[in-house]
Image (cartoon, grey):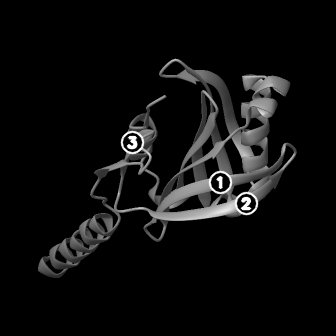
Amino acid sequence: MKRVATLILIVLLTLFTLAGCFSLTWQNFRAPDDQFQILMPGIPELQVQTIQTPLGEQEQYLYKVDKGPQAYMIGYTDLDETTLTAHSADDLLDDASARGVLAVNGKLQSFEQTTYRGYPARDVVIDVADGDGVIHARYVLVDNRLYQIAAVVATKIVDEDEVSRFLDSFTPRP
């Protein structure tokens, strides 16, 4: 009996230790151009790249924190006046969310046309890696800036409250 109790204690301690490995320490991140702020689980790294879209070449800025089985990111593209005049907010957001699914070869789990803090938005959930991972993403159009906020998490450790906390912490400054 004592041996079984010891074994159970070891298993519980191991589980608590593993759970602690994935806990995150959140801090406020304010963009260098002061156009947004968001909670991030660390100091994000900036990547700037030129991407091809149906709208032509676009420069994309991406701030990302990679925590192994979890990654949190916010990216944006500044759209020119011609693009904003030629396409509705719905078209821009629908296209961005569809391209997001294609880019990761994922399967769309849910799609919601919504608003976020008064701005047109899309919330999507994408299954990736044959169901081993999930992406919770929010696309928001604020004036001429199209934001993509995403949490990429291994399915086994996804914490819906933590993902919501991250997505809901985004505060744009027009």
Circle 3 SS class: strand
21 over 76 or under it: above or below: below
User: Which residue lies at the image location 41% right of the left edge and 51% below the top edge?
Assistant: 32
Counting from the top left corner in percent of width and height, residue 142 is at 57, 29
Counting from the top left corner in percent of width and height, residue 55 is at 84, 42
Residue 130 falls in image quadrant: bottom right
Q: Any mark on residue 122, and which? A: none
Question: Which residue lies most toward the left here?
Answer: 2
User: Which residue lies at the image location 85% right of the left edge and 26% below the top edge?
Assistant: 86
Amino acid type at image mark 3:
Gln
Sooner in the amino-acid sequence: mark 3 or mark 1: 3
Circle 1 SS class: strand
Counting from the top left corner in percent of width and height, residue 113 is at 67, 24
Around disc 2, counting alpha carbons within 10 Å, would you say few (fewer than 14), some (14 to 19), or many (20 or more)?
few
What residue sits right under mark 3 in the picture?
Answer: 37
User: Which residue lies at the image location 72% right of the left edge and 40% below the top edge?
Assistant: 97
What residue sits right under mark 2 in the picture?
Answer: 50
Q: Can residue 154 be seen by looking at this rendering?
A: no
Sooner in the amino-acid sequence: mark 1 or mark 2: 2
Sooner in the amino-acid sequence: mark 2 or mark 3: 3
Counting from the top left corner in percent of width and height, residue 149 is at 54, 45
User: Which residue lies at the image location 69% right of the left edge and 32% below the top edge?
Assistant: 111
